[in-house]
Image (cartoon, rainbow, N blue to C red):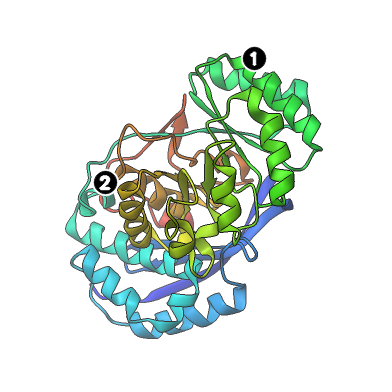
Amino acid sequence: MTTELLIRPRTLRFRAPLHTGAGMRAGVEGFWLRLGDGLGEVTLLPGFGTEPIERAKTALGEATSALRGAAPPGSPDEVAARIRAISSLQEAPATRAGVELALLDAGARHAGVPLASWLGAEPRSVRVNALLTDDEVDALVSEARARAHETWDTLKIKVGVQPAAHDATRLTAVREAVGPNVRIRVDGNGAWSEPEARARLQAFAPARLEYVEQPVPASEFESLRKLRSLARIAADESLGIPGAREGLFGGRRPAVDVLVFKLPVVGGILRARRYAALAWQVGVEVVVTSALDGAVSRAGAAHLACTLPLEGPAHGLATGHLLESDMGGYAVSHGMLFLPAGPGLALDPEALGW
């Protein structure tokens, strides 16, 4: 079977606007991809580590020409070689991630094995966090209690929209509601200066947070490193900054305690695995999370999560419920995401409109 890259623009709309420290989002733009039997997805978050849409279109054009008529790849190493040969993908991480995923899915389907197996791991269910979205204290506490009752062991809360005192009240109330054993992590989306982040982290201390994700802008690696004295610090958008490897790992100690992989920001599964190997060498944990993307990209992220240690932190892949429509999304229940049996991503192209 030969491959032909098919491209379909898509907009994912949220059931309700999502408020973050970086502003409000009503949805995300991007593309669905199909390459033979392989599926891919491009999720564009300009300003949050990905390329703008025009650069994505240019990269997709070059990828279409480069991949026309090629046979399915025979190994992940062959996928990596094909991606390296398409020059415009090197500066377009979201497009790179989508094209790479389509190639990986095609190769694993051709081999007749799940993508996780093709990557050398055992497919399994994946532990995930619950993303809580209410701003008001009482509603947030009710949501947190409901998820804890359903045995979710990790909650994630967006912060930074409200004043520091209100956020501190929200987090302390959630901690009191769910008890000491449920992990709580927060995401500032790079909204604070270092002094403001210091004040926030001190105010958040009573909530005993698992970690604080991206408290300062993505390029402020030294600020991330300094803030580690106040809380465990995670980075996600920082992975999309030029010089990220040196910034995160070039000092006497790493800039963060946790790396959070969004496939469109880090540039795909294979690049994420290389970062993970580097992180583990210096004691940095790894989490795979959604970029508020669709079923295809989240499926790829779930297979990536299967290649990571089982005893690691919960992953951030339970976001399909935020979308108006999520055809093909993997089942999620009681803090676990369940991978279906079948080769590749095990997603039916026809069910996704192909």
Identify the mark nearer the N-term, 1 or 2: 1
The CA distance from mark 1 to mark 2 is: 40 Å
Q: In which quarter of the image is the N terminus?
A: bottom left
| Mark 2 nearby-residue class (10 Å; few <14, some 14–19, many ≥20) | some
Above or below, comparing residue 57 to residue 226 in the picture: below
Tell me, for residue 68, which label it has, or none.
none
**Residue under the image location 65 percent in, 22 percent down:** 206
**Residue under the image location 46 percent in, 60 percent down:** 266
Residue 343 in view in this figure: yes
Where residue 216 sits in the image (x, y, percent)?
A: 65, 52
| Mark 1 nearby-residue class (10 Å; few <14, some 14–19, many ≥20) | some
> Which sits in the foreground, 142 or 205?
205
Q: In which quarter of the image is residue 122?
A: top left
Where residue 167 sits in the image (x, y, percent)?
A: 75, 32
**Residue under the image location 66 percent in, 21 percent down:** 174
> Which sits in the foreground, 346 or 98?
98
Q: Quadrant of residue 80?
A: bottom left
Q: What residue type is labelled 1?
A: Ala
Give left or right: position of 201 versus 311.
right
Where residue 31 sits in the image (x, y, percent)?
A: 53, 66
Tell me, for residue 342, which label it has, or none.
2
Residue identifier under label 1: 177
Q: What residue type is labelled 2?
A: Gly
Above or below, comparing residue 223 to residue 49 in the picture: above
Residue 17 in view in this figure: no
**Residue under the image location 74 percent in, 45 percent down:** 196
At mark 1, the secondary structure is helix
At mark 2, the secondary structure is loop
